[in-house]
Amino acid sequence: MMENENENACPICHRAYTYLSQHLRVSHFVVNIEERGKLVMLASGRLNIRSEACPVPSCTTQKGQLLEHSLPGPLEVEKEIEPFGKMQFPPFPDHIPVLNAVLEDYREMQEGPDPSAKLKNNVQSKLHRIRNCMAWMSQGKSGLAKMQFMGDQNRIRGWVKYLTKNGMALTTTLHYLKNVRQFFEYLKETPPKNSCLSQLDLLKVIREVKMSISSWNRPVVLHQMKIKGQKDAAMHTIKELQDCRKLALVAIPKLISKLESDFSHGNLWKLYGYVTAYLASLYGHRLGVFMNMTDVEVSQAVHGPEKDDYLIKMSNHKTSESFGTAKMLLSSGEYGWLLSLMKLKRDAGKKSTFFFFNTTLKTTEKLTTYLQNAWSDMKLRGVPTFISLRSAVATFARDRHGEDSQARKSMARLMCHDTLTADKHYAMDLNVQQAREGRLLFEQAQETTKSRTRPQSEEEEEEEGDKGEEKGDEEQESGTSSRMKKSTPRMTRSQSGKVKCRVLLSPLKISPRKRSHRSRVRRSRKRI
């Protein structure tokens, strides 16, 4: 039953909405204006379907009585693709203007004044997860404009259980929870106008989400170690990285010669694959470093006259805030490849600011495909990506130079790699060689403890120390007769360098025979 006369049922999800056109555009991604207009007319009963063509793709009939006409062949209807994979969320109530305004304000706050394309994509992913959570919590609720449904603690707990029981990966579930926690904290700090959601309800929901996040820490770490073990099993070897560079050294000059004689996009894409495979297997840079590399950065490379090499600095990449520019030091021959590529671009009349460009003169997004094609042409094992090459380079640097070595830190600065983040997730996972070295350390420690015996030199030193003590006793007895002075601590030093303190508790004199008897008993006890 519709709550408002102005509401119409959506012809796709069959829910009532006041702003149906906005719902079709945002929830069902109907961006075609003509198609969206027909759906709105269909919902309001103002569309005459008798004059429309048959909606079946394999049929071209355009006459009335569509239900009665015969089809030219068997009816083939494509299976509808589930928009959320295995999981299905209820539709977001975008007919409530307050909720749309809150999400829009949150989006603007997250993007900031000058967002990049990557930041926009990340913020859109966050909003997608938040919308799913809000759709779940608003299911079957009324009075959504007051936003009181956001404070239902039992509903948020049920949402977390739904995420975990429907096959969602642990890390993805953790992303959902963290994004939702940030949004609830935003609502707590900046509550929207006309909202009846109390601070106490918000505090309870935030606490519930935080407890869910903390409960996921242990299984997420174990999941990450399991994934890391699978990556290590398929990780590229040192020999594969070396063979990749050797084969690329031979193939790149030949491809440049082909392009100089006959410029074609097929050979250009192939050259892209070999060049990126060579540089990524050496430095382990991310895909974004190569995608955002410009002709200006290549032409402004710093020349080192001592060894005739060139340092290229790339500013637009993922970790520029932490590491500044990403760097690659190339020899004169390697730098010559890049200059040849720039010359081929100018000769072909291609005006693009990006070094690796596509047919539309924008940065190419298929560098991973070109890399994999070049890797396959070189007959190497596996299907590489820029991340897999980066993981291999970082792992070999850690195993070869040590976790806390200065060489590893220098390599990490060049490849813009945060070793603290990597060690947080992966340092605890040891391979067979590292475990073997650890076992050897345990065996050596136990052998050292077992073979540890008392040397004869220690007994000789103790006897000499007893003689020194006897001599000190005689000096004390022949000294002054002051009681306070006789009870003062006496310091003696044996030949081994050990300092011993002896306090005379009694001022009485002891006969020499009794003193020698006590010394013999003391020595015999120590030998036992």
Image (tube, helix red, strand yellow):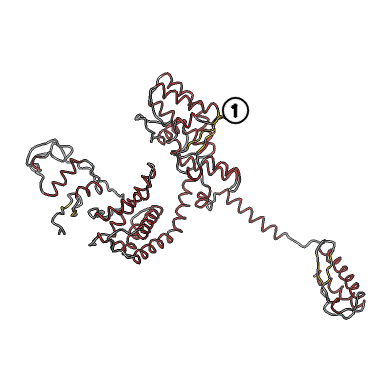
Nearest the viewer among 152 and 281 is 152
Give the residue type at disc 1: Pro
Q: Quadrant of the N terminus?
A: bottom left
Q: Quadrant of the C terminus?
A: bottom right
Q: Is residue 457 left or right of residue 338?
A: right
The x and y percentages for residue 379 are: 46, 32
Report the residue marked by disc 1.
Answer: 305
Give the quarter of the image for residue 144.
bottom left
Label 1 packing within 10 angstroms: few (<14), some (14-19), many (20+): few
Give the quarter of the image for residue 7.
bottom left
The x and y percentages for residue 504 are: 83, 76
Marks counted in the figure total 1
Nearest the viewer among 305 and 471 is 305
Q: Is residue 33 left or right of residue 240?
A: left
The x and y percentages for residue 407 are: 60, 42
Give the quarter of the image for residue 521.
bottom right
| 474 relative to 400, above or below | below
| 347 relative to 386, above or below | above
The x and y percentages for residue 74 are: 16, 39
Q: Is residue 474 left or right of residue 209?
A: right
Tell me the residue at 16%/47% (across/down). 40
* Secondary structure type for disc 1: loop
Tell me the residue at 18%/51% (across/down). 10
Nearest the viewer among 70 and 386 is 386
Q: Is residue 423 left or right of residue 481?
A: left
Nearest the viewer among 199 and 13 is 199
Tell me the residue at 50%/38% (across/down). 326
